Image (tube, rainbow, N blue to C red):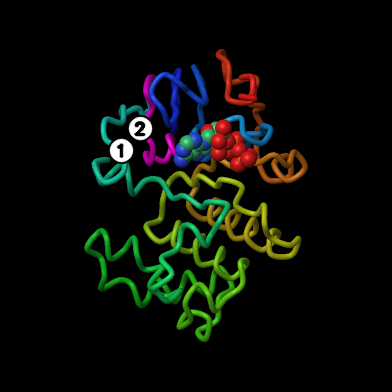
Amino acid sequence: MLELRDITAGYEPGRPVLRDVSLTVGDGEAVGLLGPSGCGKSTLARVAALLHRPTAGTVLLDGEPAHGWRHRAPRGQRTAVGVVFQQPRQSADPRLTLHDVIAEPLRATGRRAEAPARVAGLAATTGLTDDLLTRRPHQVSDGQLQRACLARALALRPRLLICDEMTAMLDASTTAALVGVLEAYRAETGAAVLAVSHDPVLLNRWCDRVVRWDDITRGTTASDRPHPL
Ligand SMILES: Nc1ncnc2c1ncn2[C@@H]1O[C@H](COP(=O)(O)OP(=O)(O)OP(=O)(O)O)[C@@H](O)[C@H]1O
């Protein structure tokens, strides 16, 4: 489903935060990626989701190399992948109602007509009531907003879900609810998952296989570099 080959990526020329990282997620497989804070997990997740262009290496989705990132990614590749980030408030437009947050991918792909039925179904799946759907992000809790972000990630029925510390800021019951939603979605659709976290207990419970950052990188990482004084 997803193959990351010798990925090098960063934010400033000549200063990669990760180097020569390789990782594969098979069809229908749930892979956990475990690593310390700051090593580059989120950066790699963004590369895998075609949101951040690597400086070197290849991203393959279903064996097809990716050539475009963000809005330049081909629609077929972009819509095959759903992403949930750690901070829902940074990834949801504060002007939109939760209904419209969830419907965003449908609107962006010209499928607006499907939104009412699809959003209602996703809201039920993720435990959002009609009342919450009419509110804006600042009028709901982090957990409620993250439920909407997960619903948004599922809106186009992705075949790969990338969850970057999806539950890091949530309480135990919301964490269990969201992981339950994902497991039900996988059971129904056979989708694959790449779950990024620094919590081994969660990843071991949730994933078929857990890989450690040190096992997938051959080069130095941000955390290896000396900090400037
Ligand atoms: N937009 C950015 N611009 C510049 N540097 C960044 C940016 N995002 C991340 N970095 C830097 O890249 C390095 C890796 O960050 P990244 O968020 O990928 O790590 P992480 O393993 O996901 O960390 P955490 O577990 O704390 O979320 C860090 O040194 C970070 O400061």
Q: Residue at x 53, y 74 (%)?
A: 138
Disc 2: which residue: 53
Q: Residue at x 67, y 63 (%)?
A: 177
Q: Amino acid at mark 2?
A: Arg
Please state the extent of the stretch shown in magenta in the rendering.
Answer: 46-57
Disc 1: which residue: 69
Q: Residue 203 occupies which quadrant of the picture?
A: top right
In the image as oriented, which residue stretches furthest toward the bottom? 131
Tell me: 123 left or right of 142.
left
Q: Residue 76 occupies which quadrant of the picture?
A: top left
Categorize mark 1 by other alpha carbons within 10 Å: few (<14), some (14-19), many (20+): some
Number of numbered discs: 2
Tag 1's secondary structure? loop
Q: Do tag 1 and tag 2 residues touch (Cβ < 8 Å)? A: yes
> Residue 204 placed where, x, y %?
73, 39
Q: Decide: is 179 above or below 22.
A: below
Categorize mark 2 by other alpha carbons within 10 Å: few (<14), some (14-19), many (20+): many
Pick the quarter of the image with the C terminus: top right
> Residue 105 placed where, x, y %?
34, 60
Q: Using the numbered discs, state the Cα–Cα distance from disc 1 to disc 2 in whole angstroms.
A: 6 Å
Q: Residue 93 occupies which quadrant of the picture?
A: bottom left
Tell me: 44 left or right of 80.
right
Q: Is residue 45 visible?
A: no
Q: Residue at x 76, y 60 (%)?
A: 172
Q: Is residue 60 magenta?
A: no
Q: Decide: is 7 above or below 44.
A: above
For ligand 1, the image quadrant comes to top right
Q: Is residue 52 magenta?
A: yes
First of labels 1, 2 by sequence position: 2
